[in-house]
Image (cartoon, rainbow, N blue to C red):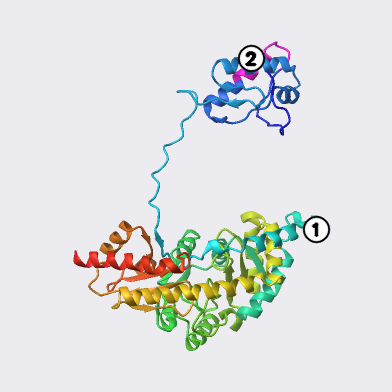
Amino acid sequence: MVENETSGPVEVLLAVRRGDGTLGSQIEDQLRQAIREGSLRTGAQVPSTRDLARELGVSRRVVVDAYSQLAAEGYLVLRQGARPRVAQARAGTEAQPPAPAAAAPTVRFDFRPSVPDVSSFPRQRWLRCLREALAEMPDSELGYGDVRGAEALRSALADQLGRVRGVVAEPERIVITCGFSQGFGLLCQVLVDRGARRVAFEDPSYDEPRIIATRAGLEAVPVAVDEYGLRVDELERSKADAVVLTPAHQHPTGVVLSGERRTALLAWLRDRDAIAIEDDYDADYRYDRAAVGALQGLDPDRVVYAGSASKTLAPALRIGWLVLPPPLLDGVTRAKLFADRGTDRIEQHAFARFLARGELDRHRRRMRTSYRARRDALVAALAAELPDARVSGIAAGLHATVELRATDDEAAILEQVALRRIALSTMSAHRFEPEPGAPVLLLGYGQVREPAIAAGVRELAEGIRVARSG
C-alpha cells in the first residue's frame, strides 16, 4: 500500500498498551469504535500508516495490517497516493445526522429595518488595514493584553467619537466589546450588582435588549415615545434605576429626543441618581437634517455611550464599544474579563488603522449618498403605489415608517407579504403590548438595491390590496 506522505500529518486520539502482543488489535478496536460512535465521521482523514506508526512508536507493518483489516470490513477507504479516509457509513455503524430542516423560502425583497448593505463592505481597504496591522503589531499585542481593549483602538475611537458625535471619551473610559448586545449584557450585570432592580425602555423599541435585561434579573418597564421622543414624565413615574434610549434617531419611530426632553432627562438622572444607556446605533446616516450630538456629551458621568460597527460596516465585524462613567468602569471591565478575556485584538488593531486612515469617514460618505438615493426611491414608490399611506421617520437612518389605514388588518397583510416573499417588520412587533390603531410597516432600504425598490413596493402594495379585498 503506497500513501501520499507529502501533505501535513493528521492526528487521531489513539493509545496502545505494549507487552501483550495485541498492538494491531488495539488499533483496530479503537478506530472501529470511533467510527461506529461517530467521533470519526464519514470522509474524515486518518493518519497515514507511517505517521500513526511514528506517533504510537510501533512497527509500520502493525499499522498496515490493522488498516487493511478495517478496509476489508468496510470501515476505511485505502487508495494509492491518497490519505486513508473513513468509508461511507453503513447501517448501524455511525450515528446518523438529523434530517436537515426545510430551507426557508428565498426572500425576494428584503425590507427589514436597520440592516446595512453588507455587499458594500470595503473588503480591500479592510484587508489592507488587517495585513498592515498584523505585520506591525508587537508580539506583546498577541497576548491577552488590557481587557478593556487595544490602546490603539481606544485612542482612535476617542478621537473619532469626539469629532463626529460630540462624545467625551478619554481612552481610559472606553471598553471594547463584541457588539452592542454583549456590552449591554455586561452593563446589566454591573447594574444588578450595584442594587438596580428596574430598567426603563422606550416603547416601542428593540426587544433584544429587554430580553437581555430580564435574563440578568432586571425588570423591564415601558416608557412611551411621542413626536418629541421619550416621555420623561412617564419615566419619572417608572421608579427605574436606569433607562435605555436611542435619542439621536429613536428606533423604530425615527423621532429625535427634543432639547427640552434632554434637559428634563438629565435632571431626572441627577435626582434619581440613575444611569442612562445611549444606544447610538445609526446616527451616522442622516439626510435632511443637521447632525444631532450624543446625549453623553451633556453629562458624561451619568450617561453610558454605546456603539458598534454593525450598522456602519457589517454585523459580522463583532466590534462594539462602551464609553463609561467612572463608577461603572471597574465593574464592566471585570465582567468583560470573566466573559471572554477581551475582544479579538488583531481585528481591533485593524479597525484602529481603518479609523486612523480615514477609511470609516470615506465609507460613511459613500453609503450616505447611496442610502439617500434608496430612501428617495422608496418614498417615490410608496407615493405612487400607496398614496394614502403616511410615511415618516425618513430624515435619517435605514428605514421608513409607513402608517396604513385604520381599517387594515395587519395579520392579513403579513400573510400576503409572506406569500410574496417580502421581508419586513411592523411597529407592533416592537411594542411591549399590542395597541389598537392603524398598522405601521417598517420598511428598510439598506439591503434593497435602488433599481429593485420600485418593484418591491409594487409587490407589497398588491399584497395590501389583496388583504383589503378579503
The kind of residue tagged 2 is Ser
Q: Residue at x 70, y 22 (%)?
A: 49
The residue furthest bottom is 260
Q: Residue 393 sits in which quadrant?
A: bottom left
Task: Give the side of residue 258 with respect to residue 149, left or right.
Answer: left
Q: Is residue 331 one of those drawn in magenta?
A: no
Residue 445 visible: no
In this picture, which residue range is highlighted in magenta?
18-29
Question: In the drawing, what numbered circle is on residue 447?
Answer: none
Task: Say the numbered circle drawn on residue 25.
Answer: 2
Q: Quadrant of the N terminus?
A: top right
Q: Position of residue 268 (x, y in %)?
A: 50, 82
Q: Residue at x 56, y 68 (%)?
A: 312
Q: Is residue 67 above or below residue 105?
A: above
Q: Are marks 2 and 1 in contact (CB under 8 Å)?
A: no
Most extreme residue toward the front is 451
Tag 1's secondary structure?
Answer: loop
Q: Position of residue 171 (x, y in %)?
A: 71, 72
- Which quadrant of the structure image shows residue 162? bottom right
Apparent side of residue 319 relative to residue 394 in the rendered image (left or right): right
Q: Which residue is mark 1?
A: 138
- State the residue at coordinates (25%, 62%): 412
The residues bearing labels 2 and 1 have C-alpha atoms spaced at a distance of: 50 Å
Q: Position of residue 160 (x, y in %)?
A: 66, 75
Q: Nearer the viewer, residue 428 or 146?
A: 428
- The vertical placement of 10 against 188, above or below, is above
- Residue under the image location 71 percent in, 32 percent down: 9
Residue 129 in the image: above or below residue 240: above
449 vs 265, nearest the viewer: 449
Q: Earlier in the sequence, mark 2 or mark 1?
A: 2
- Dot 2, crowdedness within 10 Å: few (<14), some or many (≥20)? some
- The amino acid type found where label 1 is placed reads Pro
